[in-house]
Image (spheres, rainbow, N blue to C red):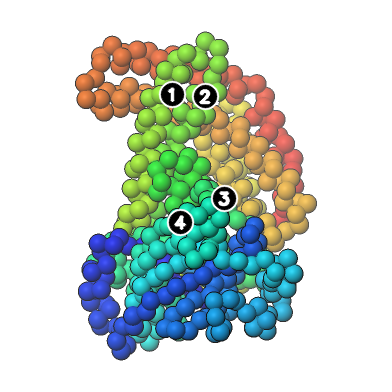
Amino acid sequence: MEIELKLLLAQQDVPRLRAHPLLAQSTQGEPQLLRMHDIYVDTPDLQLCRHQAGLRVRQVDGRWVQTLKAGGSVSGGLHSRQEWEGEVPGPQPDLAALDAAIGRKQPIRALLRQDAIRDTLQPVFTTRMERTVWQLRTPQGDEIECVLDQGVIERGADGADGADGAVYSVPVSEIELELKQGQAASLFDVALALLQEVPLQLGHMSKAERGYRLAASHPLQAVKAQPLWLDDGMTVQQAFIAICSNCLEQVSGNQDGVAGGEDVESVHQMRVGLRRLRSALGMFKSLLALPDALKGELEWLGGALGEARDWDVLADNTLAQLDGVAATDAAALAEAAHAQARLKHEQAAQAVTSARYTACMLGLQRWLQARAWRDSCSVRQLRRLDARVSPFARATLRKDQRRLIKRGKCLLHATPQQRHRVRIAAKKTRYATEFFASLFAGRAVKPYVGRLSALQDELGWLNDVQVADRLLQELPEVQAGQADQADPSAQDRLRLHAAFVRGYLAARAQAQGSDGRMHKAWRRFKAVRLPA
């Protein structure tokens, strides 16, 4: 299993990396300099890529080496994948040698045995890199390979998918830290040390993924939470690590979309991943605690994403759904709300491309990999962490449901603040149920989550109205403060539109609160059986 951490750096910062004291102090021997030419092969319809695999043949120092990578995951920049490697006589892959090397139970082996795959492999893109390799040894004795790659990924070069005759390329400037021996936490120690001198960003995509994106011309897509499978034999601690890693995978998977500054869904899904993570941390808080410094950084990131999301919802959902007499006023406000949303997207993009974000994600992963919470746990907490997860899961779901039922008793005549507390309790209950879903029968989980979702939808719209009321109060002043030469009459008109729409939304919210739909959703939830 290959375990590596990928970090991106600007070309102008490469001299700062080479001069970093850590490399001088920890390198064993002299750095190695290599020139590499990689040819990635796949079928015309990219079947290997579709099955999350990559096959390349690399020329380095006059030798040809083939490498197959498959499966694995990316969480907070940490890449874990199965890898098989061996020398070949030339630029063509040797599938017989791969077949002998791959374990029988690996799905990729059966795929490569298909004639439709074997007979249609062809070059799809190439890479050309200048590589510098430092072999590092940490004070704790861990061995890490630090690689600096600078070069280009090309489609259409050397016959790689060049049917149209054009050559397309993307530059590469990145660091890979690969664990050769020792603890994975040491990768993050090295990365955090490098970050003190060199601006770095987490790299979510491998060269193969970037090459395939170039070859297939696929746009970035928002990443939703991936299915999570917990085994009944897991300990509570193992389940906690799996849950947090799943959340971080969703967060980091949307990093590039948020960094682009425009994708609404990427911001939404990254925020969802962050909320799921914070919910998971709260779920296990009786056993372990995230350090205050990291907790503060999560709040900072959540704030940056939350502001962008709130303006998106106002502009694209709340105002867009209004009709009748309010439509004209809503249209006048929507333009200003979209402008504010664009500004907040730019600020969110700055946040996720900052060294602060990189340090936050590295710190979280280091905390997880090192199991750092155990140092401050009591004997009783350690026993509970090392116990089987199923009893903990059942107790958690029962506690969450009791909390939700208690808060929901006042729902019929609830204030907006009370409804908000019910909505948060419903969201936490749903997240917990989804985290532990694989431990229970699917026929019990599905209706429970379905009715929780229906309740959230009803409460969610009412919460959107509360958020819209706050933002509509701010909007005229925000617009006035940003205009170079504010037009007083235009600002007055905007205030009038905002005041009218606020009143219209408040009336709709009151009507919806009393039309029975929310209470029907509440009754249906109370009637469904808890999966645990």
Helix, strand or loop at label 3? It is loop
Counting residues from the start of the chain, the first of labels 1 and 2 encountered is 2
| Residue sticking out furthest to the right | 443
Q: Is residue 242 left or right of residue 503?
A: right
Helix, strand or loop at label 4? It is loop
Q: Are marks 1 and 2 in contact (CB under 8 Å)?
A: yes
Mark 1 lies on residue: 334
Measuring 26% from the left and 70% from the top, which residue is drawn there?
Answer: 17
CA gap, disc 1 and disc 3: 27 Å
Amino acid type, callout 4: Val
Mark 3 lies on residue: 224
Q: In which quadrant is the N terminus drawn?
A: bottom right
**Picture quadrant where residue 338 is located:** top left
Q: Nearer the viewer, residue 209 or 137?
A: 209
Q: Nearer the viewer, residue 273 or 428?
A: 273
Mark 2 lies on residue: 320
Amino acid type, callout 3: Lys
